[in-house]
Amino acid sequence: MAKKLRGFAVIQPVLSILVMPMGFVLWGLATIPGIYLFREVGDATVEWVEWQQLLALGATIGIGALCWCISILFMLGILGRLIRPSLEEAQAPVESLLTIRWAFLALLHRLALPSLKWMVPSFVANIYYQMMGCKVAKGAQINSPSVNDCFMVEIGAKTVIGGSAVINGHLFERDGIHLSKVRIGSKVVIGTMAQINPGCIVGDGAVIASKAVLPKFTEVPQGEVWGGIPAKCIRRADGSKPE
C-alpha cells in the first residue's frame, strides 16, 4: 500500500495549474500537420479560379482535421507509454503519488476523447489503446472511446466491445484509490453501454448484455450470458437458464 503524500493539498492545485494549459498546447501542436497542408495547398492553388481554390481549401481543412485526430492520439499515446505504471493491482490513499499518476493518465485520455470518438473502431484507435497500456489481441473490435485505465485492461482476440461500453480499471472507496486488472477473454461480446468494473474476469465466448453492469471482481465463466444491474447469469454455456 502506498503512503500518504505530504503537502498534497498544495501539490494538487499547483499541478492542476500547470497541467491544464499543457492539454491545450498539445491540442494546438497536433494541428501542425493540418496547418502545413493548408498552407501548401493555398500556395499551390493561388492562381486557380476562386471556386476551385475554395473547393481545394475546404477539402484540405477536412483532411487537416483527420491529421489532427491521428496526431493527437499518437502524441498522447507516447506520453502515456512513458508514464503508465506496470502493475496488476494496487491500493493507495487519495493523497498519494499513485493517485496523481493515475489522474494524469486519466487527463491524457480525456484529451484524446474528441478524436477517439471518431476513430473507433479502427486500427488507429487500437494502436492508441496499446500505447496507453491496454493489451489488445488480434482481431479485437473496440467500438467505444471509454476503455479507461488502459494499463489495467486486457482484451482477447476477436472480442467486440460495443458502442459506449465503459471499462474501468479503478474505483475510489473510503480508503482511497483501488486499481485492479480487467481481463476480457477471446470472442467475447460486451454489449452497448455495458459497464465492466475493476478486477472483473470475462471468460472466452461470454456475452455481457447491453447496459449490464458487472460489479467489481466478478468472474464470468466461459460461454455464459450475463445481463442486468447488477449483472447476473441469464444463460449458461450449455444453453440452459439458471434456476
Image (spheres, rainbow, N blue to C red):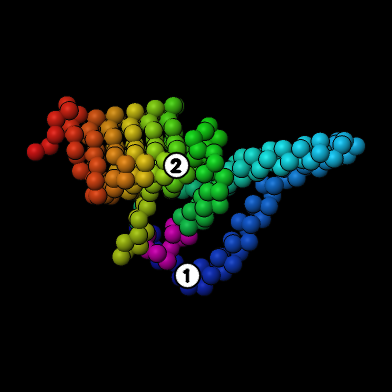
The first of marks 1 and 2 along the sequence is 1
Distance of label 1 from label 2 (alpha carbons): 34 Å
Give, as a single range, the part of the protein colored magenta: 92-100
Q: Amino acid at mark 1?
A: Phe
Q: Residues within 10 Å of mark 2 (few under 14, many from 20)?
A: many
x and y percentages locating residue 54 in the rendered image: 79, 41
In the rendered image, the vertical position of residue 141 relative to residue 28, given as above or below = above
State the residue lying farthest toward the left: 243
**Per the image, is 189 magenta?**
no
Residue on which disc 1 sits = 8
x and y percentages locating residue 214 in the rendered image: 28, 46
**Per the image, is 96 magenta?**
yes
At a point 42% along the width and 41% down the height, the residue shown is 163
Element assignment for label 1: helix
Do we see residue 111 in this rendering? yes
At a point 56% along the width and 65% down the height, the residue shown is 15
Residue on which disc 2 sits = 144
Q: Amino acid at mark 2?
A: Ser
Front tag of 1 and 2: 2
In the rendered image, the vertical position of residue 205 relative to residue 163, given as above or below = above
x and y percentages locating residue 203 in the rendered image: 28, 33
In the rendered image, the vertical position of residue 142 relative to residue 195, given as above or below = above
Q: Residues within 10 Å of mark 1 (few under 14, many from 20)?
A: some
